[in-house]
Image (cartoon, rainbow, N blue to C red):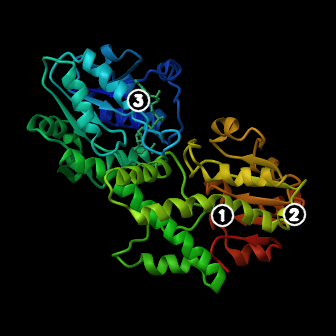
């Protein structure tokens, strides 16, 4: 089957490469010429483990191609996926659907046969109806069904998630839509992937409900961590103690600097807007958004406390290890590191940083932060070292070298990757999250 993937970012490129790997003929389309040029040269426009090899082998087999020309890309495609961005709209937090609508209009103009238009982007309830209206307005003579197929992959583990998903959600209103989607995902049935057919609106809401629930879990354990610090408990024990209950589950119970990334912040906000529009408040999610927002700067203040408080901060230096919102990605969107760095800079602290993959995208967001060539260069002369992202490279730092290079042996571990007793035994003033 020929599949067109409109939007070749984190989701589109990974999905396209995986579909090609399943044996489909895939054209990845993007309006960003430099992205497509790089893909033609075999250079990945994003960092995602394993993606370069997957793309290379499917390009070599002739099943995966790239273009900026949508009309050419969708010609003969049975499934046309929309995988463009849906960022927060400036000012009100609503999902900005302008990219999705623009693609729908272009598809309406150029569709050249019966096809299913599949929204893979995360879009608010009712967006499928609007895409359907746009297509209907174009009076295309072809049968075009609009289907919702939200994506649940995680950056950093995207290929594995796509190939072995917990579930595939398909929101379809017609048999034609369901048939094509069955064909698209048939190769996955060998792995017994549970495919779930729902209404289009349910599928759209499932994605937001899932992200809001995960954001709630993270925020819940973060507040428990704060309480642990006050009452003299250990959040890692609390987390293990509750997570081993099958009804709760151990995942997303790691206390840290607050959630960030390209999805949770914007999707929780968009869900609030939908709830407001339909006069059906989601107060738990409201609280989650507020608590998480204030947490990011609070983490900056935690670092300030470790170097003697805000009043003594001016002129001091802090090294940040890790800038991306999580390891194994170069994605800086809404990373907690941004708020942590900004809080320090606002207090007059000089900030140097190192991240294995994120510095290129971090530079324009954090122009006042000095980007170092390696973790030890960032640490030189620092009054405190702060671990913001739990990259493997920071899990086994040469602590003797850290102590030698830094001005003071202060380690603020916002991801709890070190053992407090061991680090303190090495002479560090060690601060972590929720461990008294
Ligand atoms: P992204 O910004 O990495 O990629 C979007 C791409 O779409 C860009 O390359 C952009 O140039 C392209 N684009 C925009 N308008 C276009 C047009 N008219 N024609 C062709 N290409 C166009 O975004 P992403 O992270 O891949 O996210 C895409 C969607 O998937 C979002 O709705 C997001 O919420 C959702 N999602 C993302 C993730 C994730 O982990 N990144 C996971 C699940 C769902």
Q: Secondary structure at mark 1?
A: loop
Crowding at dot 3, Cα within 10 Å, few <14 / some 14-19 / many 20+, comes out as some
Question: Residue 162 location, x and y as percent?
Answer: 35, 45
Q: Is mark 2 within 8 Å of ligand 1?
A: no
Determine the CA span between mark 2 and mark 3. 46 Å
Look at mark 3 in the image and give the residue it sits on.
99
Look at mark 2 in the image and give the residue it sits on.
311
Looking at the image, tell me whether mark 1 or mark 2 is earlier in sequence order.
Answer: 2
Q: Is mark 3 within 8 Å of ligand 1?
A: yes
Tell us which disc is closer to us: 1 or 2.
2
Look at mark 1 in the image and give the residue it sits on.
414
Q: Are marks 2 and 3 in contact (CB under 8 Å)?
A: no
Identify the residue at horizontal 81%, vertical 47% (top origin).
Answer: 377
Crowding at dot 2, Cα within 10 Å, few <14 / some 14-19 / many 20+, comes out as few
Question: Residue 336 location, x and y as percent?
Answer: 62, 53
Identify the residue at horizontal 51%, vertical 30% (top origin).
Answer: 44
Identify the residue at horizontal 55%, vertical 64% (top origin).
Answer: 291
Q: Secondary structure at mark 2?
A: helix
Tell us which disc is closer to us: 1 or 3.
3
Determine the CA span between mark 1 and mark 3. 36 Å
Q: Residue 431 occupies which quadrant of the picture?
A: bottom right
């Amino acid at each position: 089957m020929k599949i067109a993937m409109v939007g070749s970012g984190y989701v589109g490129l990974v999905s396209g490469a995986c579909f090609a790997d399943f044996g489909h003929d895939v054209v990845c389309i993007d309006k960003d010429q430099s992205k497509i040029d790089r893909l033609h040269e075999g250079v990945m426009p994003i960092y995602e483990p394993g993606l370069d090899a997957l793309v290379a082998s499917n390009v070599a087999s002739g099943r995966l191609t790239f273009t900026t020309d949508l009309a050419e890309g969708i010609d003969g495609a049975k499934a046309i996926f929309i995988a463009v961005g849906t960022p927060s709209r400036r000012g009100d937090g609503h999902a900005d659907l302008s990219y999705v609508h623009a693609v729908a209009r272009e598809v309406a103009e150029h569709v050249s046969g019966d096809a299913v238009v599949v929204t893979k982007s995360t879009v608010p309830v009712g967006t499928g109806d609007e895409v359907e209206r746009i297509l209907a307005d174009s009076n295309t003579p072809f049968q075009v069904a609009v289907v919702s197929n939200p994506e649940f992959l995680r950056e950093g583990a995207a290929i594995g998630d796509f190939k072995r998903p917990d579930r595939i959600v398909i929101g379809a209103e017609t048999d034609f839509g369901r048939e094509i989607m069955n064909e698209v995902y048939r190769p996955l049935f060998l792995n017994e992937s549970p495919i779930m057919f729902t209404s289009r609106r349910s599928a759209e809401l499932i994605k937001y409900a899932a992200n809001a629930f995960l954001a709630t879990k993270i925020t819940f354990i973060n507040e428990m961590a704060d309480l642990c610090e006050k009452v003299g408990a250990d959040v890692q024990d609390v987390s293990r103690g509750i997570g081993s209950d099958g009804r709760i589950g151990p995942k997303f119970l790691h206390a840290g600097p607050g959630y960030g990334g390209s999805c949770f912040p914007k999707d929780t906000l968009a869900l609030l807007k939908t709830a407001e529009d339909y006069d059906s408040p989601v107060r738990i999610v409201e609280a989650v958004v507020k608590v998480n927002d204030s947490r990011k700067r609070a983490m900056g203040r935690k670092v300030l406390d470790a170097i003697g408080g805000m009043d003594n901060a001016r002129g001091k230096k802090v090294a940040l290890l890790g800038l991306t919102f999580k390891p194994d990605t170069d994605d800086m969107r809404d990373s907690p590191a941004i708020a942590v760095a900004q809080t320090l800079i606002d207090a007059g602290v000089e900030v140097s940083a190192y991240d294995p993959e994120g510095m290129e995208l971090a530079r324009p967001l954090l122009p006042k932060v000095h980007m170092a060539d390696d973790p030890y260069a960032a640490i030189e002369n620092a009054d405190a070292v702060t671990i913001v992202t739990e990259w493997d490279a920071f899990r086994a730092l040469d602590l003797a070298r850290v102590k030698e290079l830094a001005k003071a042996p202060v380690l603020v571990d916002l991801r709890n990757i070190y053992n407090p007793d061991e680090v303190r035994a090495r002479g560090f003033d060690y601060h972590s999250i929720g461990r008294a």
